[in-house]
Structures are given as C-alpha cells and as structure tokens.
Amino acid sequence: MDREELKRKLFWKYLRRKKRFINFKNPKLFTEKIQWLKVYDNTPIKTRLADKILVRDWIKEKIGEEYLKTIYGIYERYEDIDFSKLPREYVIKTNHGCKMQSLVIEGHYPERNAKETFNNYLKINFAYKNGYEMQYDKIKPLIFVEKYIKNTNELFEYLIFCFNGEPKLILFGSGKRNKTVSCTMFDTNWNNLHFNYGGNLHTEEIPRPKNFEKMLEIARILSKDFKFVRVDLHNIDGKIYFGEMTFTPGGGFMKFSEPKYDRILGDMLDLKQ
C-alpha cells in the first residue's frame, strides 16, 4: 500500500471512529498525530521492535537481557509445542499483534479449542485488524511460550508514554487476568491524573512502584530515537520486566475518559523533532 492510499484509508477510518475529520497537514490531537506517524514515520525498525520475538535482541543490546522474560520455545504451528517439557504455569502468545495469548496456570491444561484458536491467530495480518498499523505488516507470525510471572494473582502493567524520547505519562493497568480491567494515568512524579482510556479508573490508592526512577530511565533509553512510543513494563516487587514497544496504542483511535486529554497529549508530541 503506498502512502497516499494509506492516508485515504486512515482519513475515512478516523472519520468513522472519531466522528471528525483528521487534519494531516496540521494535526493537533494525539489521535491525529498517531495517524500522521502511521503515514509519515513508519520505519523498518518499528517492524523489528513490534515483533515480540525479534525485539528481544534489541533489548539485550540496549538495557541487557536481565529485563527479558524467559521463553521456553518458539513454534511455527501450535502442534509443534511439546507440552511435556513445559512447567506447570506459562503463557502462550503470538509475536505479531496484541491480545493473542492464553494463560496456563495452577497445573491446568490449555483451553480445549486452543489449537484452532492459535492456528487462526497465525493467519491474521494484524496490520489491518485495528486500523492500518503497518509496522505489523511484514512480521512473520509465530507462537512462543513464555514464563508466567505475577504479583499475587495479578500482573500489573506500567505503560510509559514517551514523547520525543522523554517519558511523560504512565498508564497503570490491572485486571486483565480477571477481566475487570482498570487503568489510571499518572505523571512522572506519580501524581494521579484521574483519567484513562478503556477500562475503569482505579478507586483505590495505587502505590508508587519500587525502582520507579529505574523504570523511567529504561523508558528513556528505549524511546530515544522515536517521536512517540509507549514502553510497556512490568514490575514485580522492584524486579522490572520488559513487555513490549507499542507505537500505535489503540490504533490511535482511543477514547479518553475526558476528551480534552486528546489535545493535552497531542501538545506533548512534537512531530517536527
């Protein structure tokens, strides 16, 4: 797909999803600027880093392999997985998109339809699933099995929004494993900003994570060469794990709990840098 065709498709997609015209010449909103980046800043390195397997070597180079979760195996088909060699708990994932995973915990077995589900996942070109996220287009789909990590029965996520190489906001998320998703945005001083997109706002107080400054340092290193990227990390009692590099969160169509934040985040992103 050439640039002009991509631009046309995103124009109409944005109109349908956001009920407004996108301004590619002078974007102001964060969601507009994510669409602009899709058209004018889709570089090959983003494809490498969007691949959950290939990104690992880059992470080793940048911050060290101690921040990576253990991988037990990589497979071209679900049938290739030798479950007899796996521990009692693990996560089955694909490398080429989002929300394509399955937990196996407490000695249980994979879901009965897991083979069909994952082999269907492998047929998906995620670039076209949620709004022309072309960094996923050339990724070879694979399945991998990863170590299961948790804090108590939940895995907290710290999604660090980095603008022009500087972390500015952290979306704290919880509940994905029990399907009661909550997320709340914080600034880099861990002040609760009381807004989000998707899920519920946390009603309880969220403690500042251990090694928080180290998390920001990691995000700063990993985001250095990008106008925008969300660096997703986990933190288990101060032990930091890399999650993924997210260049187009929500496909750039997120609905903020208050619309004004679309412009506030947009003002943080300088496309001219």
Image (cartoon, grey):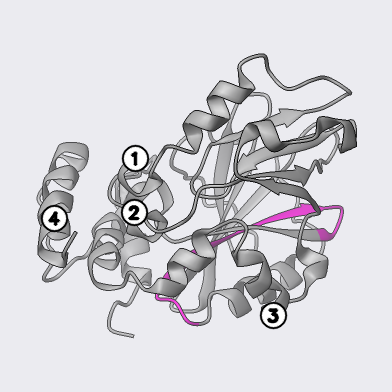
Out of 259 and 105, give the one closest to the viewer. 105
For badge 3, the amino acid type reads: Glu
Query: Which residue is drawn at the image coordinates 72% and 30% (left, top)?
Result: 103
Q: Verify whether residue 237 appears in magenta.
A: yes
Indicate whether 192 appears above or below 48.
above
Residue that mark 3 sits on: 61
User: What element does badge 3 sit on?
Assistant: helix
Nearer the N terminus, badge 3 or badge 2?
Answer: 3
For disc 4, the neighbor class at 10 Å (few under 14, some 14 to 19, many from 20) is: many
First reached walking from the N terminus: tag 1 or tag 4:
4
Horizontal and vertical percent for residue 86? Answer: 86, 37
Q: In the image, which residues are magenta?
A: 225-239
Q: Residues within 10 Å of mark 3 (few under 14, many from 20)?
A: few
Q: Quadrant of the N terminus?
A: bottom left
Q: Nearer the viewer, residue 190 or 232?
A: 232
Residue at horizontal 77%, vertical 56%? 209
In what element is the residue under mark 4?
Answer: loop
